[in-house]
């Protein structure tokens, strides 16, 4: 097997190795994190907490009602995806990891930013773009007497304010580390539109958060960037990364409040499935319902309790481009794997599972001298009738004459409960994904990105 590809796969496993364990009774706000892990808040938050900030942003966005949408680029970075946004006055471009599993945006901040124990994917320090508040005339500290800060720290005695004149601090927790700093109110720039009063975290210290760069939060809670901006729809199409360190880009689109969702794609083959209300345990996730799973033409007999999300957050499927590989409940994974073995065993010899550490094994097959066209596709059928088919290139990673299945068992990652399926970015490659927040539905279609 090629050492280069093995190294890239190992990086992805480093991300998955700190995949959040969902069975902790103390992690009511815990969430499956990005390529690594999304941060979870120490306190619960209510929608009213962010209404003033949202209203201020909406007043600015109302000036842009003649503009249908804004577009930026989403870029590959080895096993993750990043987008660049401009904060501050004058604008400072900041690179973020895209994450739908968290609801608070933060960036590395000030000249004193330090990331200790971080597994940096890039040896180039320029990859970590740092925001400098002193160079922005629109940067405003959120102080402790501000109602937003007071409500945020209402139940957080371990990281609360000491006095009203202090800037509002935060600490976001990861499985293997954390990031801490203070809240800013800052201006976000899209083309010619300036959007003030966006609440963002200014991190001074991070520990064990892998890449060391920040997260742009596109989850469902009121603190997320879409909620603050009043976004009606956002969409992306992930170009295949194949663990390459050469960036590739594709469009990332936002449709804002007050301008109406662009329905120009309504007849272009997009299938829709409704979002399911997120349970209190995982309020940030985009839950959908898979009604059937097939391998090739064979239905995998998955019990309904795994496919339908329950009120406790167990079961169902969540969409998360911040996670590299698709992760399945152990029972679901075994059922899918067994069907793959039945069909592929007719043509290919299964080789010893590839173990790159962290107790995570990849199921692999040798196809030397055989026609690789006999690899069955994996398909998800969604409520509403849509079908999402994942071809060989989205399910297998090749290494010389060996291919390995890129579907992982949650049990091997220490996850005992939560969503039955987390659809990662590897399986989303070359699929247009539309998050229609106005109509609460997910749109998708196969497309070369």
Image: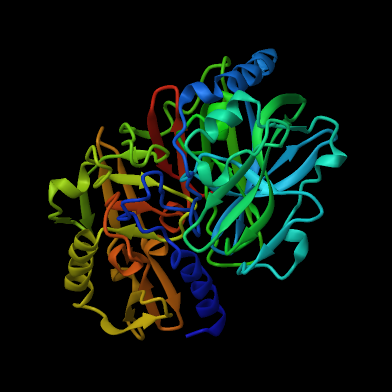
Dividing the picture into quadrants, the one containing residue 88 is top right
Taking depth in this image into account, of 388 and 135 the one nearest to the observer is 135
**Identity of the residue drawn at 38% across and 81% down:** 355
Image height of 31 relative to 175, above or below: above
427 to the left or right of 79: left
Whether residue 270 is visible, yes or no, is: no
Position of residue 52 relative to residue 363, above or below, is above
Closest to the observer: 320 or 404?
320
Residue for point 74% across, 49% down? 109
Task: Tell me residue 249's x, y (percent).
Answer: 63, 51
Say left or right for 294 vs 190: left
The answer to whether residue 441 is above or below residue 290 is above
Residue in view at x 57 percent, y 53 percent: 81
Task: Give the image location of residue 147, x and y in percent.
Answer: 60, 24
| Viewer-closest of 434 and 333 | 333
Is residue 165 in sight in this rendering?
yes
Name the quadrant containing residue 148. top right
């Amino acid at each position: 097997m090629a050492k280069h590809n093995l190294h890239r796969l190992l990086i992805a496993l480093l991300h998955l190795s700190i995949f959040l364990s969902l069975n902790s009774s103390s992690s009511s706000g815990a969430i499956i994190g990005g390529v690594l892990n999304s941060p979870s808040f120490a306190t619960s938050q209510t929608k009213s907490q962010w209404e003033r900030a949202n209203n201020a942003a909406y007043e600015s966005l109302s000036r842009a009602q003649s503009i249908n949408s804004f577009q930026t680029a989403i870029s590959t970075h080895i096993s993750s995806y990043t987008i660049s946004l401009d904060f501050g006055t004058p604008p400072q471009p900041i690179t973020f990891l895209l994450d739908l599993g968290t609801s608070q945006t933060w960036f590395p901040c000030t000249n004193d930013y330090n990331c200790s124990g971080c597994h940096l994917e890039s040896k180039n320090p320029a990859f970590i773009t740092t925001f400098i508040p002193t160079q922005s005339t629109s940067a405003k500290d959120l102080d402790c007497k501000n109602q937003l800060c007071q409500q945020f720290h209402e139940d957080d005695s371990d990281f609360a304010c000491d006095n009203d004149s202090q800037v509002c601090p935060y600490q976001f927790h990861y499985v293997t580390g954390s990031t801490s700093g203070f809240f800013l109110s800052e201006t976000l720039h899209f083309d010619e539109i300036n959007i003030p009063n966006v609440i963002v975290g200014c991190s001074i210290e991070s520990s064990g958060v892998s890449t060391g760069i920040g997260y742009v939060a596109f989850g469902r809670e009121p603190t997320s960037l879409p909620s603050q901006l009043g976004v009606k729809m956002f969409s992306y199409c992930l170009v295949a990364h194949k663990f390459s360190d050469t960036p590739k880009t594709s469009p990332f689109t936002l449709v804002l409040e007050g301008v109406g969702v662009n329905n120009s794609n309504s007849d272009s083959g997009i299938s829709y499935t409704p979002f399911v209300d997120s349970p209190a345990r995982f309020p940030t996730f985009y839950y959908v319902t898979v009604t059937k799973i097939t391998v090739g033409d064979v239905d995998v007999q998955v019990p309904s309790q795994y496919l339908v999300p329950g009120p406790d957050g167990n079961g169902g499927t969540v969409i998360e481009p911040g996670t590299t590989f698709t992760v399945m409940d152990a029972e679901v994974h075994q059922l899918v794997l067994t069907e793959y073995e039945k069909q592929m065993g007719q043509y290919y010899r299964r080789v010893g599972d590839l173990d790159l550490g962290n107790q995570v094994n990849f199921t692999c097959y040798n196809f030397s001298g055989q026609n690789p066209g006999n690899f069955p596709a994996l398909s998800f059928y969604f409520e509403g009738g849509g079908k999402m088919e994942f071809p060989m290139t989205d399910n297998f990673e090749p290494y010389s004459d060996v291919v390995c299945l890129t579907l992982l068992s949650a049990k091997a990652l220490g996850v005992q409960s939560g969503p039955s399926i987390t659809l990662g970015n590897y399986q989303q490659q070359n699929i247009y994904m539309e998050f229609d927040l106005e109509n609460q539905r997910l749109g998708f279609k196969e497309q070369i990105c």
